[in-house]
Amino acid sequence: MSTRKVYITQTGRSEIRCLFLMLLLALILPITSVASESEYPRILDHPWDHSPITVYIDNKSVPPHYSPTYYTQVQKALNYWEEGGNRKLEYTPVFEIVDSEKADIRIRWIENLQKDQGAPNGVAGDTIPFVVNGRFVRVDIAFGVGTYQWGEWVPYSDTAMLAIAEHELGHALGLDHSSDKQDIMYPTNEQINNTNPILSKYSSLLLIAAYAFLAIIVFISVNWLLSRKK
Ligand SMILES: [Zn+2]
């Protein structure tokens, strides 16, 4: 009799496992379909109605931890996009660095983006485009110069600043965030900003975390039910 009972329990167990797998698939499928959007995300296809795009880089009123080498990284980032960047622009931008704050793109450095701009943790750059009649009329870019890690100040390296500058300039040229980790427009911790697109990125990450949490809860309760059956 006892062997027969065990046999029945085993069948019940595999049925529950099967149900659990199906539930997991139902949860995962909508996420993958959202993630595999083929169209490259853009704020605007052609944000600037003129060329060259003028750029003002404020290296006069800089914060205490500013490094003069950061200016060169911004120049390199401008060259990167003039030479095609990540190949996702439908036009070739031409930049002109000017000594006037009336420039199309205005770039400055801020000591602490979290404290001074109210940016979320880990945010290193912040781009604010001003849109009139479907075109950019002005874009303000702010870069941090470093971050506190366990109470210790860690300045951004030139390599980090270059990546941040390339990413933020990508926004200033109309690109939105990419889901491709290899793409410069992928919002990693070093590069993320606090414009609206990043908020939607955060919410989708939160959604995935919630699904994962739910899956773990289901898994634990299924195992608990099975152990009670023993
Ligand atoms: Zn961004």
Image (tube, grey):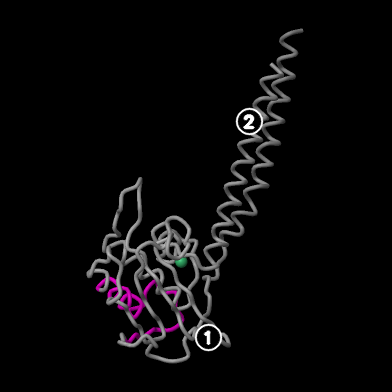
Relative image position of residue 26 (x, y in whole percent):
68, 47
Q: Assess disc 1: are there few (<14), some (14-19) or many (≥20) residues with their C-alpha within 10 Å of its C-alpha.
A: some
Q: Assess disc 2: are there few (<14), some (14-19) or many (≥20) residues with their C-alpha within 10 Å of its C-alpha.
A: few
Which residue shows up at 68% across the image and 28% down it? 14
Horizontal arrangement in the rendering, residue 208 relative to residue 169 (left or right): right
Q: State which region is magenta.
A: 72-96
Label 2, on which residue? 220
Instruction: Determine which of the numbered discs, if any, sits on residue 103 in the image.
Output: none
Looking at the image, which is closer to me, 222 or 189? Answer: 189
Which residue shows up at 26% across the image and 73% down it? 71
In this rendering, is residue 169 above or below 8?
A: below
Q: CA distance from mark 1 to mark 2?
A: 52 Å
Relative image position of residue 114 (x, y in whole percent):
43, 60
Query: Residue 145's quadrant in the figure?
Result: bottom left
Whether label 1 lies within 8 Å of ligand 1 gets the answer: no
Query: Residue 154's quadrant in the figure?
Result: bottom left
Looking at the image, which is closer to me, 190 or 100? Answer: 100
Relative image position of residue 99 (x, y in whole percent):
30, 87
Nearer the viewer's eye, disc 1 or disc 2?
1
Q: Is residue 152 magenta?
A: no
Which residue shows up at 53% across the image and 79% down it? 44
Label 1, on which residue? 135
Query: Residue 62's quadrant in the figure?
Result: bottom left
Looking at the picture, which amino acid does disc 1 mark? Answer: Arg
Horizontal arrangement in the rendering, residue 50 relative to residue 154 (left or right): right
Horizontal arrangement in the rendering, residue 26 relative to residue 127 (left or right): right
Q: Helix or strand or loop: what does disc 2 sit on?
A: helix
Q: Is residue 73 magenta?
A: yes
Whether label 2 lies within 8 Å of ligand 1 gets the answer: no
In this rendering, is residue 20 above or below 36?
A: above
For the N terminus, give its image quadrant.
Answer: top right
Q: Give the mark nearest the N terminus, 1 or 2.
A: 1
